[in-house]
Image (cartoon, rainbow, N blue to C red):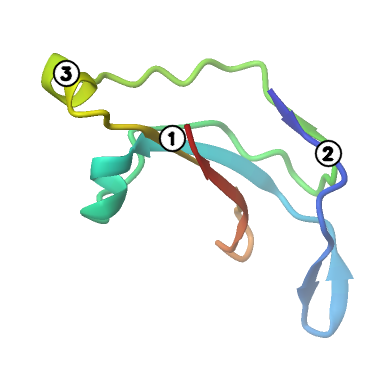
Amino acid sequence: HGAFNLPFMNSNEQSAFPSPFVTCKTTLDAKEKKPAKAATFAVSNSREAIWKEKLPIEISVDEIQSSVGLFVSLIDSNTKKYLAKCIV
């Protein structure tokens, strides 16, 4: 997976490249504000990041039957700000 054309991050009145990484957790964990169950490494100073990693997530049968989704987020490791997020 990858992220392209990411925004510049403002740091001390200067534009800077983000250092993005991806996290993944269940929507139930997101609602309860629990930490991510899986994350990629951060790609340093890049607006065009590619990860060749798998993010294994364990979900119980009960969670699947109750339609729990996955909350996927793209975060800048320097500022800890979301660059993008979605539920699948």
Within 10 Å of the Cα at label 2, are there few (<14), some (14-19), or many (20+) other Cα atoms? few
Give percent across and percent down for residue 8.
84, 62
With 34 as the anchor, is 60 left or right in this view? Answer: left
Looking at the rendered structure, the secondary structure element under dot 3 is loop
The tag on residue 38 is: none
Q: Give the camera-side residue of 22 and 44.
A: 22
Q: Give the camera-side residue of 30 and 88.
A: 88
Q: Do tag 1 and tag 3 residues touch (Cβ < 8 Å)?
A: no
**N-terminal label among 1 and 2:** 2
Task: Identify residue for label 1.
Answer: 24
| Looking at the image, residue 59 lies above or below residue 74 | above
| Looking at the image, residue 19 lies above or below residue 79 | above
**N-terminal label among 3 and 2:** 2
Looking at the rendered structure, the secondary structure element under dot 2 is loop
Report how far apart the C-alphas of labels 1 and 3 lie in the structure: 16 Å
Give percent across and percent down for residue 10.
79, 74
Report how far apart the C-alphas of labels 1 and 2 lie in the structure: 19 Å
Give percent across and percent down for residue 60.
16, 18
Q: What residue type is labelled 2?
A: Phe
The residue at the point 25 percent across, 44 percent down is 29
Task: Identify residue for label 2.
Answer: 4
Q: Do tag 3 and tag 2 residues touch (Cβ < 8 Å)?
A: no
**N-terminal label among 1 and 3:** 1
Within 10 Å of the Cα at label 1, are there few (<14), some (14-19), or many (20+) other Cα atoms? many
With 14 as the anchor, is 36 left or right in this view? Answer: left
Q: Which amino acid does label 1 sit on?
A: Cys
Of circles 1 and 3, the one toward us is 3
Numbered-mark total: 3
Q: Which amino acid does label 3 sit on?
A: Ser
Q: Name the quarter where the N terminus is drawn.
A: top right
Within 10 Å of the Cα at label 3, are there few (<14), some (14-19), or many (20+) other Cα atoms? few
